Amino acid sequence: MTVHVIQDWEMKTACLQTSYFPEDHTGEHIAEAMQEAIASWKLQEKHLVAITTDNGSNIVKAVELNEWLRMQCFGHRLHLAIGHGMNDKRVTRAISLCKRIVSCFSYSWKKRRHLAEVQIQLGLSSHRLITESATCWRSRQQMIERVLEQEGPLAKVLSNDKKTMHLVPTWQDLEVLEAVQKVLKPLQDFKDALSGEDYVTLSYVKPELHLFVTKVCWHAKRVIATFANRSRPALLSTSTASILNQPQLTYWRWLHL
């Protein structure tokens, strides 16, 4: 539980507690636990302006039971939108391949050693691969970025072993990953702007939405169009085709934000 207050006209943030919660994570139990947490810190409910949470049905119900004003977390909504936006068979396959490549090197010290040697031979930075976290879209973007950066050394190491040759990305996989990377990269600025603790991030939401629609969605539409033109017509899904024929605002709604 984190509390945000204004003191001497400055934003202050403090993590009050992280509690062990062995009970079932039902709305009733969570509501009771939050009440106990407030009481233990001798905080008064009348001073509580609002609470920010994700969209989990249990936490939503808990806030409703306590009759508190709930603010949806824009960062969480953005995470969900990105997940929906990448709901495509080609993207799913390419990202799954990235995960298997990372897993392959994570569990083999010999391959990590071989990768380091090849990186030196090719004059590339000795960067390690990045594991994706299911709860953070940024980690997926970082994973893809690192795989693309190290594509040469990875292909050389994987192709030297018959058991891992099938993990070498094809040109189609690399093309999909590059398209996803181009779309996700600009979103990091949105994440940074909405992660501040010394200013009111809610004030950033409307400007961020405007930039998203006018800049990022426009750029994403061009990336999708470019990728679609390179692919065979039969590979162009109905959802992708509909996006290309819709205005930016409709595309924005399609992202579920």
Image (tube, grey):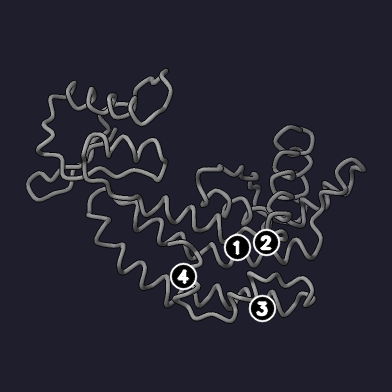
* Mark closer to the chain start, 1 or 3: 1
- Name the residue tied to disc 3: 226
Q: Nearer the viewer, mark 1 or mark 3?
A: 3
* Mark closer to the chain start, 1 or 4: 1
* Mark closer to the chain start, 3 or 4: 3
| Amino acid at dot 3 | Thr
Distance Cα–Cα, label 3 vs label 4: 19 Å
Distance Cα–Cα, label 2 vs label 1: 6 Å
Distance Cα–Cα, label 1 vs label 4: 19 Å
Task: Label 4: state its secondary structure.
Answer: helix
Q: Nearer the viewer, mark 2 or mark 4?
A: 4
Identify which residue is drawn at 41% across, 56% down. 191
Q: Could you tell whether 153 is left or right of 95 in the image? A: right
Q: Could you tell whether 186 is left or right of 50 in the image? A: right
| Amino acid at dot 4 | Trp
Which picture quadrant has residue 229?
A: bottom right
* Mark closer to the chain start, 3 or 2: 2
Task: Label 3: state its secondary structure.
Answer: helix
Q: Mark 3–mark 4 contact, CB under 8 Å?
A: no
Say which mark, if any, is on residue 177: 2
Identify which residue is drawn at 77% across, 70% down. 235
Q: Mark 3–mark 2 contact, CB under 8 Å?
A: no
Identify which residue is drawn at 29% across, 62% down. 204
